[in-house]
Amino acid sequence: MRLVDSHCHLDDARFQDDLDEVIGRAIEAGVETMMTIGTGDGPPDLEVAIRLADRHDCLYASVGVHPHDAAKADEGTVRRLENLLRHPKVLALGEIGLDYHYDNSPRETQRLRFIEQLELASSVRTPIIIHTREAWPDTFSLLEQHWNPAAGGIMHCFSGGPAEVERSLAMGFHISFSGIVTYAKALEVQEAAKLVPSGRLLMETDAPYLAPIPHRGKRNEPAFVLETARKLALLRGQSLEQIVEFTADNWRALCKPGLHRAKPNR
């Protein structure tokens, strides 16, 4: 298999003691490539994912300011992000967006930092990775005003239903499903998963969060993306092999056009 975990947080402290083993288990499970997300604990450190990607051939990175950390950013943050986007292993800007559930940063500050990063991604034609929680209307509104769809984008850890997936698709987004799609009560997410064209489908773990069935309640890790693939195959009436191929090809076409299949070395 050549699975891609399009979104994981391998800088998390829960991987501090056994990251090499976690990556090894992923490779053994057929996970060829992992995108580790570079938001970390927020500014001033914007390079957490780059440091990991530089050490492991099978890892790629993003950079960005998570909405939780919007209040930590300043006027120089976007300039630093623009420089980091030139790193050869940095393939996307994210995760960025709005989170009105926790409100760890004031909403107006979240919106300001989101706009700044949308405009940066649009100007340099870099794909964005969107985090949205209890903020769909504002997320869509700001995207419509400040983002160039030609840059490409991912709705990460999709948690909406058919209405949100249809609007996201109409805006040009790829849709990434996490372990949530395996949960018995996630009926709207499961319905949404059936509607995504094969050419727009992605998978992720969001590790160490949201472990899929049958690992729910445990620390999530990239090897478990295989369970999400199995659930998507069942929901969509496609084979596991098709899901793996679609999602791997889609990620490469969006984030690394022309990328040859990388050897899964550590």
Image (cartoon, rainbow, N blue to C red):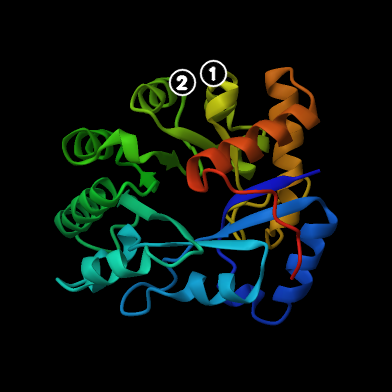
Q: Are marks 2 and 1 in contact (CB under 8 Å)?
A: yes
Q: Name the image quarter holding the N terminus.
A: top right
Residue 169 visible within the image: yes
Seen in the picture, residue 21 relative to 177 is either above or below; the reply is below
Q: Quadrant of residue 191?
A: top right
- Three-letter residue code for mark 1: Leu
Q: Earlier in the sequence, mark 2 or mark 1?
A: 2
Q: Which residue is mark 2?
A: 162
Q: Nearer the viewer, residue 203 or 252?
A: 252
Task: Tell me, for residue 87, which label it has, or none.
Answer: none
Label 2 vs label 1, nearer the camera? 1
Q: Which residue is mark 1?
A: 195
Task: Give the quadrant of the C terminus.
Answer: bottom right
Mark 2: which amino acid? Pro
x, y (%) of residue 99? 32, 51
Left or right of residue 25, residue 157 in this image: left
- Using the numbered discs, state the Cα–Cα distance from disc 2 to disc 1 in whole angstroms: 7 Å
- Give coordinates of residue 263: x percent, y percent: 75, 58
204 or 103, nearer to the observer: 204
Query: Tag 1, which secondary structure?
Result: helix
